[in-house]
Amino acid sequence: MAGRPRDWHPIADGDPVPGDPDRVAALGRQLRKTADELERQIRSLKAVSRVDSWDSEAGKEFRQKAKGNVGKLEAALKRYETAADALGTRVAEVSGGYQDQLHAKPSNYATDLNRAQRIADAALRDAKEAEDRKDAAQRSLDSSSDKGKDEKKKLEEQRGAAGDEIAAAQEKVSQAKEIRDKAAKRASDAIDAVISDDSLKDGFWDKFDKWVDDIGSWAEEYATYFGVAALAVGWIPVIGQALAGVLGAVATILTLVSTVATIIQVVRGDKGLKDLAFTVLGLAMMGVGKAFAKIAGKYVQRAIKSMDKASAANTPSQRRRAVKAINKVAGSTATTLREKFENKMGTFKLEPGEWRKSMIEPFTEPFSKAWGENLRALNPFGGNYQAAWSKTVIRGDGNALLGVGRSLSMADPGVASDLKDIKFASQGLDSLGAVNKISRNATGLSLVGAGVTSVGMALDSNLNPFLD
């Protein structure tokens, strides 16, 4: 097909009937080829389903499934045949002039598009010729000071006639667009009709399954984003834990939505038990991460309390008692293997019921009072932003940017900011080796918690592809 005209002045701003009839016909031929292949497969399946010599249970089951598939293939065949016929497999040229083109019997889309374009192209040629005559008449009128009245009248009539021809060309273009639009609607209606009520049409449960899959995938993806964001903001002084709590709550809600979607998909047979197992395991590991965060948090608070007492000690005896408490927290007072083991187990100890509470916390935390408390802490009109800024500046010795650098941490959000406070609580106690040990212990506990939580977030479709 030759290229379409680019300049449509004076009848249109751009091509009023764009498209490539030859490419439309090429698509129609491709659809027809697929239809022919489907027809061949249908004949083969019908022939196999009539074979009675394979008289075993497997043979009977095969013939039964073959018969069921024939119906689906026939529905697909009808779709492809209808689409091929609607679009057309070749461009049939319509002979004759404008009236013949205008009143030709409607055909397939490729042919009618070609017919509409021929009308529009001819109208454009006529309009350009009329525009030239109109401009020539106008130029003559502009220099008509030496012309007589009859000659001026003749030029005006020529100009008017040329204008009428341009208007007639515009009307032809409108008719060409109407031919194209009607052809497109006929093709669209034919295809819609064949797919609207055949055996391949999605039923309620097909649509429901797709909706569940879309919701589950969306919730799963954004749960990961919010979960990572929650882990990344816990280091911010004062408000970091509240911000991480809000982001973590949103991540948990989305994870629960994804879990419900996975359960539905398992029941519907769209996913296997492995998918459900990874989802449940991921939630469980998030609960374990919560437990480690609590252990680290208690350990840090205990250590900071002892350091504050040592720093505030006014007498040697008070300082000795505080230093002894610091050493005990660090595990430096243990001498025998048994004492070291008991000390270590004490570090990892939670109160009765706290492990169970931590395991169910991913389910309950988004609906607890902590949600409201965190939002109040983040209230832009009454939150703790000024305190957060002041603490950052203090950590940077007056330089906020340096304070941010000193505050950054990949530890669990529940204890990330407190970990940094150990360093500042230990000022004046640097000579105590126990302080560094406490910091290492607390950081290790917190990183384990953050790591376990991260693995829990990864145990979904983000990881499954590597395990299939």
Image (cartoon, rainbow, N blue to C red):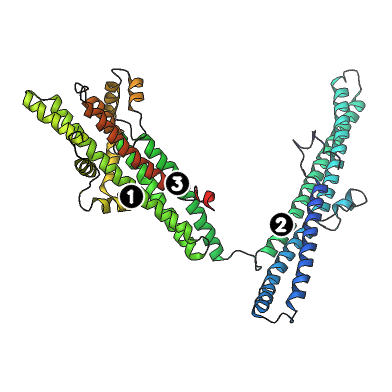
Label 3 to label 2, Cα distance in Å?
Answer: 45 Å
Identified at 69% across, 71% down, the residue is 71
Q: Residue at position x 29%, y 37% from top?
A: 415
Say what secondary structure mark 2 lies in: helix
Between tags 1 and 2, which lies in front? 1
SS of the residue at dot 1? helix
Say which residue label 2 marks: 188
- Type of amino acid at the residue the image marks with label 3: Ala
Q: Is label 3 or label 2 in front?
A: 3
**Camera-side residue of 129 and 18:** 18
Q: Residues within 10 Å of mark 1 (few under 14, many from 20)?
A: many
Q: Which mark is residue 156?
A: none
Q: Could you tell me if the residues under marks 3 and 2 are in contact, i.e. CB atoms within 8 Å?
A: no
Q: Which residue is mark 3?
A: 458
Q: Are marks 3 and 1 in contact (CB under 8 Å)?
A: no
- Which comes before the other along the chain, label 1 or label 2? 2
Q: Position of residue 341 (x, y in %)?
A: 23, 43
**Can you say whether 444 is above or below 49 in the image?**
above
Q: Quadrant of residue 109?
A: bottom right
Q: Which residue is mark 1?
A: 287
Q: Nearer the viewer, residue 30 or 179?
A: 30
- Name the kind of residue labelled 1 in the image: Gly
* Mark earlier in primary sequence (3, 1): 1
Q: CA distance from mark 3 to mark 1?
A: 14 Å
Amino acid type indicated by mark 2? Ser
Q: In which quarter of the view is residue 452 placed?
A: top left
For disc 2, the neighbor class at 10 Å (few under 14, some 14 to 19, many from 20) is some
